[in-house]
Image (cartoon, grey):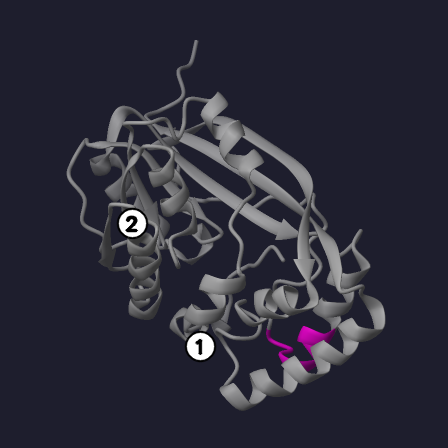
């Protein structure tokens, strides 16, 4: 589930997935934040901006770690859900409904800007201009992904096959864990300063995996309610045949860390 953009992207409406997204779509596991902290990212007191925050999974975790967090998303339904979850957890996060390109943030104020599972949707040139304004000279951008691996996980593979039966336009199938995205337009204004990836087995129940898939681009964000219900019925029957009530799905977690300025040359 390493998605690419296509002519079908204009049909995506993440607002339709807000309820399932909040309940069933997990963010990266604790190990992800531990690795970032080892790189001095996500430390208490840092000013962080989370772009395309969805229901605020990363924003809320960084706020729990003591960061001062701003977050934006283009879908008003997602932002409303994120605000409610943050309030329930007594977390102070400054949310705004805006695309990454139109997000407003103070200049030279951000220690970290995060973009999880979303950078491919952005207008790179416009966002890079924002990043140069937002980030402190020693600040960083973290582009991260949290993707299941169908080639080594039979439940994920069977689910992908079913998604494609219901939505042949979906382009997120078949991620091999090797192909890395290209981010054209970032250089020379942003340069790589770090990268990591690793695999982890993420626990699910049949119900939570069904919810996770409904909260995906291939199903809930694209199909109409009747189509989602039809998929869900078949998915439930499939999982009853191939999966135990509780199981794990192997995911690959990665983070690309970039900083402002050009790479020094000798």
Relative image position of residue 176 (x, y in whole percent): 72, 50
- Which picture quadrant has residue 52? bottom left
Point 50% across, 86% down: residue: 224
Using a 10 Å C-alpha cutoff, classify the residue at mark 2 as few (fewer than 14 neighbours), some (14 to 19) or many (20 or more).
many
What SS does tag 2 mark?
Answer: strand
Residue 140 appears at what percent x and percent y?
36, 30
Q: Quadrant location of the C terminus?
A: top left
The residue segment tinted magenta is 162-169
Looking at the image, residue 158 sits to the left or right of residue 222; the answer is right
Specify the farthest residue to the left. 106
Residue 100: tell me if it is visible: no
The structure residue drawn at horizontal position 25% and vertical position 60%, both measured from the top left corner, is 98
Q: Main secondary structure of the magenta part?
A: helix
Give residue 71's mark.
Answer: 2
Would residue 157 appear left or right of 139 to someone viewing this image? right
Q: Secondary structure at mark 1?
A: helix
Query: In which image quadrant can residue 123 be found?
Result: bottom left
Q: What residue would you read off at disc 1?
A: 11
């Amino acid at each position: 589930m390493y998605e690419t953009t296509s002519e079908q992207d204009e049909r995506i409406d993440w607002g339709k997935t807000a309820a399932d997204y909040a309940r069933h779509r997990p963010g990266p596991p604790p190990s992800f934040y531990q690795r970032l902290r080892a790189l001095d990212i996500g430390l208490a007191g840092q000013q962080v901006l989370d772009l395309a925050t969805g229901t605020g999974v990363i924003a809320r975790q960084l706020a729990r770690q003591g960061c001062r967090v701003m977050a934006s998303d283009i879908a008003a339904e997602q932002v409303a859900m994120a605000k409610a979850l943050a309030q329930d957890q007594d977390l102070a996060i400054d949310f705004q409904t805006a695309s990454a390109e139109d997000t407003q943030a103070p200049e030279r104020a951000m220690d970290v800007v995060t973009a999880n599972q979303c950078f491919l949707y952005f207008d790179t040139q416009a966002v890079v201009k924002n990043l140069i304004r937002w980030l402190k000279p020693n600040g960083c951008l973290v582009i991260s992904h949290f993707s299941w691996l169908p080639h080594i996980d039979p439940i994920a593979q069977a689910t992908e096959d079913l998604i494609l039966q219901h939505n042949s336009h979906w382009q997120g199938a078949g991620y091999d864990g090797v192909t890395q995205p290209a981010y054209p337009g970032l250089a020379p204004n942003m340069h790589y300063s770090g990268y990591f990836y690793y695999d982890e087995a993420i626990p699910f129940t049949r119900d939570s995996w069904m919810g996770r898939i409904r909260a995906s681009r291939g199903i809930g964000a694209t199909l109409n309610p009747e189509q989602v219900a039809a998929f869900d019925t078949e998915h439930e029957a499939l999982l009853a045949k191939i999966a135990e009530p509780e199981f794990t799905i192997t995911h690959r977690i990665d983070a690309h860390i970039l900083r402002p300025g050009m790479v020094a040359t000798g």
